[in-house]
Image (cartoon, rainbow, N blue to C red):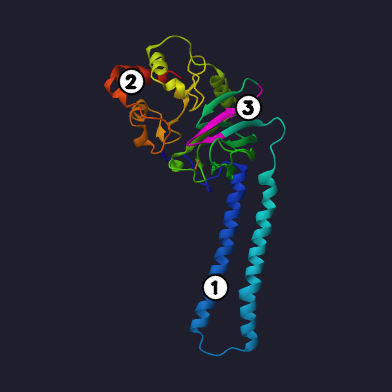
Amino acid sequence: MPADLNHSTLTTAGDGAARIAELFYWMLAGATIILVVVIALSVYAIASKRAHHERTTKRLVIGGGAILPTIVLSSLMAYGLSIMPELHRPAPEGSLTIRVTGVRWWWRVEYLDIGGEPFETANEIHLPVDQPVRFELVADDVIHSFWIPSLGGKMDMIPGRTNYLTLHPNRTGTYVGSCAEYCGRAHANMQFRVIVSEPDEFQTWMAGQRRQAPQGDSAGLRVFLSSGCSACHAIRGTDADGPVGPDLTHFASRQTIGAGILENHPNHLERWILQTYQVKPGVEMPAFESFANRPRQLRQLIDFMGTLQ
Ligand code: CUA
């Protein structure tokens, strides 16, 4: 993973994540105080030779064993509860709404209320900085959990219901999202990228995503259609309209392949097509090993995928 990618709850780039990080630091401070007091009392108890007054003993036991932990833990609980309304506050009406569906083992991403034609992409989410975003989180098969550690808390995706999560990114950059609920063999390889950019840059990206793939007949598209790729994958503007796997209309604009696990590079795409299962054990996409005997067609296919900007 390149060093400029953020995948940490402590490198915050969202309001929710900042509150959660503050809570973590206060809990760490509270835990440190309790630990220091417990160790000091233990050392004192071991080292002390003389017998104590019964009153002093009682004070130490009740004060250190009951009163101090009660004060520290109650304060931390009160503080933890006090930030929950902010974390759960719904996004204002008219906010950017993105539906993300957890699928074994990738992410379907649909831009819905965006003041224009909705569109679909996969495994990569672009957001404008300093604007609240409303996520509608659903699942097709099993329970997944949607988590962008640098932006905010996680939220389960449960088949048969819709959960909502509001995030408010406050710093541009590229962040990593993960599935945070064990969902089967490729759970650890179910990642995505989040790109937070300035609003005009975001609008340019949206305009690009809304476009259909470039029209025209190409050898690579014919390979795509005749080799079975289009049974699962859609490329808007062509005859490929498979609804099962990730929409590939703007595949070449994305940073990764295989749900966040390989950088998007022609060599990686070749490996992905030929050895899908070795790259991502458990993946539902079959490997197309027969391309090994058809290098020209494989090259045409990969070149065509590279044009899907
Ligand atoms: Cu999806 Cu773990």
Identified at 54% across, 77% down, the residue is 41
First of labels 3, 1 by sequence position: 1
Q: Viewed as shown, does residue 203 lie left or right of 232?
A: right
Q: Viewed as shown, does residue 101 lie left or right of 231?
A: right
Where does the image place residue 238, in percent across and percent down from the top left? Answer: 49, 14
Where does the image place residue 140, in percent across and percent down from the top left? Answer: 55, 35
* Whether residue 61 is situated above or below residue 160 in the rendered picture: below
User: Which residue position holds label 3?
Assistant: 112
Q: Is mark 3 on a helix, strand or loop?
A: loop
Q: Viewed as shown, does residue 81 lie left or right of 11?
A: right
Q: Is mark 1 on a helix, strand or loop?
A: helix
Count residues near mark 1 (Cα–Cα under 10 Å), then give few for <14, some for 14-19, many for 20+. Answer: some
Query: From the viewer's perspective, is the residue at label 2 or at label 1 nearer?
Result: 2
Where does the image place residue 91, in percent across and percent down from the top left? Answer: 69, 37
> Which amino acid, mark 2?
Leu
Q: Can residue 114 be seen in this view?
A: yes
The span picked out in magenta is 101-115
Q: Can residue 130 be seen in this view?
A: no
Q: Residue 38's mark?
A: 1
Which of these two is toward me, 116 or 289?
A: 289
